[in-house]
Image (cartoon, rainbow, N blue to C red):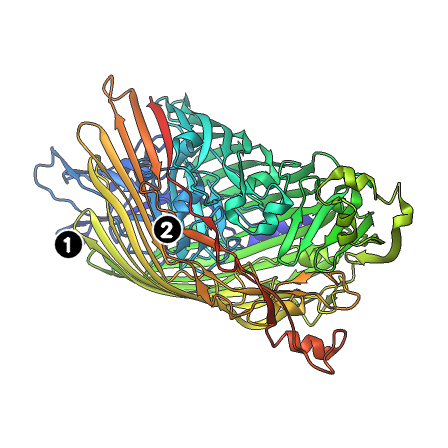
Amino acid sequence: MKKLLSFLSVFLFGNLLFAQQKHGALMGIVTYQNEPLVGVVATLEGPNLIGKSSSVSNEKGRFRFNLVPPGGDYKVTLTLAGFRTLVRDHLSVNLGQVTELELEMNTDSVSEVLVVSGESPLIDATTNQISRNFSTELIGKLTNDRQMQMVMAMTPGAIEDNNPSMLGGASTDNLYMVDGADNTDPLTKTWSTALNFDAVEEVQVITGGVSAEYGRNQGAVVNLATKSGGNSFAGNLRFIASDIDWNSEDDGKPFDEATKYTTESRFAGTLGGPIIKDKFWFFTAYETRGKEKQTFHYATLEDYLSRDAGRQTSRVPKYEGHYFNVKLTYQPTPDHTIQANYNEDPIEFPLYNYLNSSNYGNGDNITREQGGDNLLLDWNWIITPNVITSLKYQRKDSPLNNRANYHSTVLEPVQEYNASFGTFYTETSAPTSDYYSAREYDSYNFSLNLFFESGWGFHDIKMGGEVRDAQYGSISPAWAGGFRMRWLASSGIGRMRIYDDPRSWVLTNEDYQALFIQDTWSVNDKLTLTLGLRSDHLSLANVDNVEVVNLKFGDTLAPRLGFAYKINQDSFHGSFSQYYDAIGDWIVRNNAPNQLYYADEYQLNLRMSELEAMGLAPWINPNDWLQINPQDHPDLWTYRTQYTFGSDGTADILGTIDPAYMQEYTLGYEKQMGSRYAVGLNYYNRTWKNAYEDEDFDQDGQWAFQTYKGTWRKYEALILTAQRQFTGTGLQFFTSYTYSKTRGISASDNSTAYLDSPYDVFNWYGRTLDYPTQIKFNGSYTFDFGLNVGLNYQFFSGSVWTPTISVENQIPGGVNEGGTATPLAETRGSRRLPNTQRTDLHVEYGLNLFNGKLKPSIYADVFNLLNQRYAINVNSDMGDGHYEYGPGNEPGTQGYIDYVTTHAPVLDDPNSRFGEYTQYTFPRSFFLGINLQF
């Protein structure tokens, strides 16, 4: 009943217009002798549109088509008694954008039809929103690792990664949409379900001035539309092959590349067409996954202790699964469209080996099982030409589990060697952890869009809301069986912990509602104002439904204001926006019931040096462990203490948990250079405020939560762009130059890593996610005889890094006492790695057979064509040190806490390998493919 009432309240007071997230629009003004022409019948038709759509020009001469599927080859026909019929063809409609036309009719030769051909404008001069649209015409002619992240990386200001960081935002700050459905993982806030890349129709990446209909993001909105089928059967069959043996050698330089340096035979196919012509279409896609990638790790403790990256061993773990999606579109009448989407992507791989975790001697002993499924049901109703409504339901379930292939026992514990500079899990170690998670939600949306003329111009009003009922969380039994042996190299002591872990699942129950209203107000034929306001309500409760967080609508008022001024075909635009971010589930985790667990610690009576003198090294040799294990040799062990971990469900909240937000200002100018070229200059100013933080300075495992007021990250950028539109053959490109500056205390989402302990505070404000210069070029040239050559180029300033000094954690009685802390020795981001660049090449030759009904092609993708290898990670450990805290500031006093939060440690024992590079960009690699379109 509660959910029904929430949904009805959204229905009554507003709605969220998701229709624009998978469609575009086409708008035109018809004139005769420079005066508006009323009553003109405009008819739109195209290969992606079921049937035909009609609109009649009003007293301003304006007609408009909404809910237009993105694509090309659209045609508008204008008719009016007494006037010559006018046809404008070869039009394109972009995802999330408005294509504007200015059309002049006349009365000459009324019996004839005038056909006007020409490209659609490259600039949407009606919006202050800064976005980039990538069509299959561009994506399909470039090097392509068939990952969504590749398209994001082409966007100005994006930092390429498995989950890219966008314009100063964290990798978890983005919102991902597929056909109007949220594809963001509710737990990790990253890209969720994958799909066959051949199913993609168009991708829009919105980076500034985001409209009020979008929430839960502070980075970018990635909006993807898939193909829908058509009145003719069409599809493709594709085979892609890659092999590590074809690629350039690593030359002793470790790297981590999961998508471009692989061995895989990949089969993919799509098929779409009519079930009933002009009524009912389908589209489906399937793709196999079975890739192997090269990873590096220290196979033995001896190799790890050398800290020599050249001694790492290469392995080739396998990643297996498939992608599947199906889409049904039914239009019983021209005013009603019903759509159903389903997609899934089950995947399995050896976790620590595949993730390139170099400190696991056996990276294959835990298997990751991931992937989920999405269901979307969507109904659009054109009530009148000026009123559109939509009803949507989405169901998402995307679990991710790490399954230990066997579990620790007293005779085979997790073997953990704690060196001063890090921890190594020896090759004889049991798996470190199990992890099982839930990530699911049901979402309900109702939408309404109103279009009308007033005495002050034309209004496009959207008002909306969403109700989402989500549950996400996890359970991770301690140390996969509960037996953990710690070898503390700095003190030469061996300690074993035996865990008693009665914890249940930690689940967050999320009750989320959103409301917004936005008026895109065309004041005249030059000026468009955007007046938007969004507000979210978020309630987070623990597994017993005890509410922990309650952000009300009044707490999250987010203005979205902007203007766009049209100068000929150019656009001068600016915006002010505020974006609120969802609170992470870690606050609820620390207020979850039944989360205490315990460890009895036993200390070995023999020191490590004594064992070695006896010829024993159980941290290396499992047979040696059998000679000293506490079950068979209890006389060698002394009970030391019991530790209590976890939360008792009463975490301390200091003050209030206020919403974190980001404020953004943008200003830009986009200029159309003829019919096919456009350039742009955009300025961004982003400020993140109100960091959620958890702190545990006494290290007792009981966290305190609060909101730290003020700025904690700031981003500024000036971005220059240029593009050329594709016309079937010849040149197309999109290129950008970005100059930016990023400062802050953390690169993560809403901080959460700043005050974990007193060792984490000093020097933490500085350069983060800071890449001052980015240059990107993505383009292709298509020859008349079927050859296409595509080129991707990127240049990045080197990433920043900070030296650390390893010190002993001296918080008395703390859960990490005796372990190693690594405070920053210099201001965050004080040093920078070398600049990087990469050139990728795509070469494809295709044929048109049977009048274009069959289009076979062969192609090669070469990643890192010039085999340029650059350092992207470094050994930042300067060595071992200590704090010179002085009398009265000894560990256990407030003076000690005050000292370590305001001073850097002093270096005692320098690390000879400090500053050595530990990871590089990947070597040159190849994909070969065959594609058959039909």
Label at residue 155: 2
Classify mark 2: helix, strand or loop: loop
Most distant residue in the left direction: 108
In the rendered structure, are the residues bearing label 2 and label 1 in contact, judged by CB atoms less than 8 Å apart?
Answer: no
Q: Residues within 10 Å of mark 2 (few under 14, many from 20)?
A: many
Which quadrant is home to the C terminus?
Answer: top left
Query: Horizontal placement of 915 versus 606: left or right?
Result: left
Residue 616 visible: yes
Picture coordinates of residue 496, whole percent (x, y): 80, 50
Query: Horizontal placement of 771 versus 376: left or right?
Result: left
Picture coordinates of residue 25, whole percent (x, y): 34, 45
Name the residue rendered at 24%, 16% in the picture: 850
Q: Along the line of sight, which residue is nearer the eye, 672 or 796?
A: 796
Picture coordinates of residue 510, whole percent (x, y): 66, 52
Label at residue 688: none
Q: Quadrant of residue 129?
A: bottom left
Q: Along the line of sight, which residue is nearer the eye, 310 or 423?
A: 310
Label at residue 34: 1
Picture coordinates of residue 288, whole percent (x, y): 49, 27
Q: Which amino acid type is shown beneath numbered disc 2?
A: Thr
Query: Horizontal placement of 516 versus 427: left or right?
Result: left
Name the residue rendered at 87%, 51% in the picture: 637
Q: Which amino acid type is shown beneath numbered disc 1?
A: Asn
Closer to viewer: mark 2 or mark 1:
2
Whichever of labels 2 and 1 marks the residue nearer the N terminus, that label is 1
